[in-house]
Image (cartoon, rainbow, N blue to C red):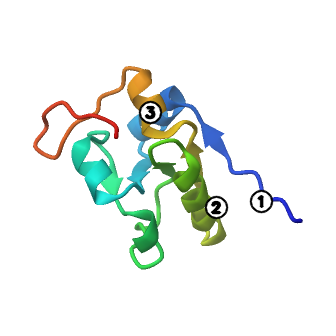
């Protein structure tokens, strides 16, 4: 059985630094997860719609989901399509556990579900 290629990963602190430096934080969770809480600077494209809603070129990408599994698949696809992308290890759970902000669409405090 062939093993999936290793996906480049960063921790939440490194992800936040990459975003500060201009990387796109791409949240691939489902709409209900996004609405409950997301990183303030994230863009939302559910994993199932990613092939049809590819991000603009020109920025590196940090992919994120709840735990890192779906965003690992998104990262693999993005790399295959020629993007520079990394996966946020531990996902939004790690982001929130690191004390980084989680908000709702109206800017209120959010939660990771």
Q: Distance of mark 1 from mark 3, alpha carbons?
A: 24 Å
Viewport quadrant of the C terminus: top left
Residue 15 percent across, percent down from the top left? 49, 36
Q: Distance of mark 1 from mark 2, alpha carbons?
A: 9 Å
Residue 45 percent across, percent down from the top left? 36, 63
Q: Residue furthest right?
A: 1
From the image, state whether disc 1 or disc 2 is nearer to you: 1
Viewport quadrant of the N terminus: bottom right
Residue under pointer 2: 76
**What residue lies at 42% left-to-right and 57% top-to-bottom?**
28
Q: Residue furthest bottom?
A: 52
**What residue lies at 87% left-to-right and 65% top-to-bottom?**
2
Seen in the image, is 24 located left or right of residue 70? left
Q: Distance of mark 3 from mark 2, alpha carbons?
A: 21 Å
Q: Which mark is residue 108?
A: none
Secondary structure found at label 3 = helix
Q: Residue furthest top?
A: 99
Residue 103 percent across, percent down from the top left? 22, 36
**What residue lies at 32% left-to-right and 57% top-to-bottom?**
44
Q: Which mark is residue 93?
A: 3
Q: Are marks 1 and 2 in contact (CB under 8 Å)?
A: yes
Secondary structure found at label 2 = helix
| Mark 1 neighbour density, 10 Å: few (under 14) some (14–19) many (20 or more) | few
Residue under pointer 1: 4
């Amino acid at each position: 059985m062939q093993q999936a290629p290793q996906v480049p990963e960063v921790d939440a602190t490194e992800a936040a630094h990459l975003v500060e430096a201009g990387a796109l934080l791409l949240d691939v969770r489902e709409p209900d997860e996004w609405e409950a809480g997301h990183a303030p600077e994230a863009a939302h494209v559910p994993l199932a719609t990613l092939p049809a809603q590819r991000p603009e070129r020109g920025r590196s990408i940090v992919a994120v989901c709840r735990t890192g599994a779906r965003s690992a698949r998104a990262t693999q696809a993005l790399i295959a399509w020629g993007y520079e992308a990394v996966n946020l290890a531990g996902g939004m759970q790690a982001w929130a556990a690191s004390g980084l902000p989680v908000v709702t669409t109206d800017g209120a405090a959010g939660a990771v579900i």
